[in-house]
Amino acid sequence: MAKGYWIARVDVRDPERYKDYVATAKPAFERHGAKFLARGGAYETMEGPDHARNVVIEFPSRQAAIDCYNSPEYQAAKAIRLTVADAEMVIVEGADA
């Protein structure tokens, strides 16, 4: 089964309150088997608009990634994120090796 991935590009407006989002989202990530492959860090923008924070999260499947996003735990975190950051996010299915 192919893995699923969240790919998020984020501009944080309130770094202190963004910590609340991270803490609130953690249980959803743990319950759905999330593994962070990239979380911020150094980057080079090659094309398109620049975003200060780039995140890639691996899940056991695309459905697990979708279920995590739709979970009550993540929706509570999302409500916080919407007030403190601007984000673009997609969920993609990984390529079978």
Image (spheres, grey):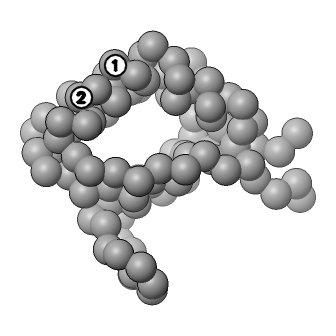
Judge from the rendering whether residue 73 lies leftward or rightward of residue 60; answer left or right: left
Amino acid at dot 2: Ile
Is residue 93 visible to the viewer in this orientation of the structure?
A: yes
Q: Secondary structure at mark 2?
A: helix
Pointer 1 with pointer 2, Cβ within 8 A: yes
**Residue marked by disc 2:** 80
Does residue 28 appear to the left or right of 5 in the view shown? left
Q: Position of residue 8 (x, y in %)?
A: 45, 53
Residue occupying the point 68% across, 29% down: 64
Given residues 52 and 87, the one toward you in this image is 87
Which corner quadrant holds the C terminus? bottom right
Which corner quadrant of the image does residue 58 belong to? top right
In front of the other: 31 or 72: 72
Specify the amino acid type for callout 1: Ala
Quarter of the image with the N terminus is top right
Counting from the top left corner in percent of width and height, residue 85 is at: 22, 46
Give percent across and percent down for residue 9: 39, 58
41 is higher (above) or lower (below) than 74 = below
